[in-house]
Amino acid sequence: MSSRHFYHFSALPMSMRMVYGLDGNPGSVSAQDIRTAYHGSESDTRLETALKGPMADMLPPEERNVIFSWVKDGAKEAGYAEKVKPIVESRCLACHDGSNPHLPRLTSYEKIGKLTQKDEGATIPTLVRVSHIHLFGITFIFFIVSSIFAHAYMKPLWLKCAVIVLPFLTIITDIFSWYLTKMFPGFAWFIIISGVLMGISFAVQWVVSMWQMWFYTLPDDIQECGGALPVIRRKLNTDDV
């Protein structure tokens, strides 16, 4: 038996279907990127990791190479004043002037010197803060999407339930794997697998919901009761009597 506790999309008013019918990665992320983000880099400093990753497009290659050479030479203050400071002032201080507490401050040699230490990845306080955001933010999205998909007609019922539950399980494995990757970089693959399963579940829920909401024709026995589910239909028949 399928869909035991909801009316199908076709039985919902047009206004509700319009609400459900509007939905909202660039680039690719490798396992090495994830290892570096959570565990850190075995060879690069925090500054090098940033310039090779999210900040790569902020500087032209020749200026990035100047900074890389300065770091490899020991990140000395004399070299900073001569080679690095002009680049930082012209390219970086617009954002890294200290006005944004979430960005490193690059206003002096001492501040930049902190970024020339070994990259050890995300800190535990950062992981805890982001974990809180994911658990109490993204799960609301899961709840809303699953509430919409619950009106869909899918057999067998266990498959529909699995598709609904999967995102809630993968967000737990995803976040738990952050901490494991911090200690053991090989667990980066668990983060990737969790993300893939989460994406598949969302894709199935969205595609099935949109298709059934506007194009799908229900089986005759469910159409006869106006889209009501079997259990509800029996209750309605009893009440009529």
Image (cartoon, rainbow, N blue to C red):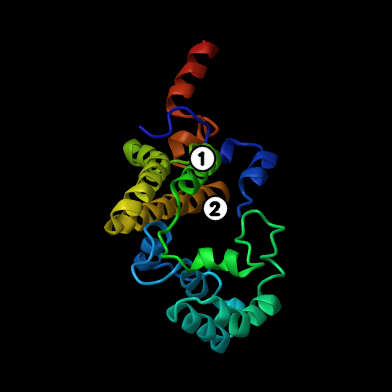
Q: Residue at x 43, y 33 (%)?
A: 3
Residue 38: quarter of image:
bottom left
Q: CA distance from mark 1 to mark 2?
A: 39 Å
The location of residue 147, given as percent across then percent down, is 52, 36
The residue nearer to you, when weighing 129 against 27, is 129
Q: Nearer the viewer, mark 1 or mark 2?
A: 1
Residue drawn at x 43%, y 67% is 29
**Residue sitting at 58 percent across and 50 percent down?**
214
Q: In the displayed structure, would residue 102 be above or below residue 20?
A: below
Residue sitting nearer the eye, 85 or 234: 85
Q: Secondary structure at mark 1?
A: helix
Q: Which residue is mark 2?
A: 215
- Which of the two discs, 1 and 2, labels the residue nearer the N terminus? 1
Of residues 226 and 69, the one nearer the viewer is 69
Marks 1,2: beta carbons within 8 A: no
Identify the element where label 2 is drawn: loop
Q: Is residue 225 above or below residue 63?
A: above
Please name the amino acid that badge 2 sits on.
Answer: Phe
Q: Amino acid at mark 1?
A: His
Q: Quick check: can you spot residue 25?
A: no
Image position, residue 114 (x, y; %): 52, 63
Which disc, if any, is residue 132?
A: 1
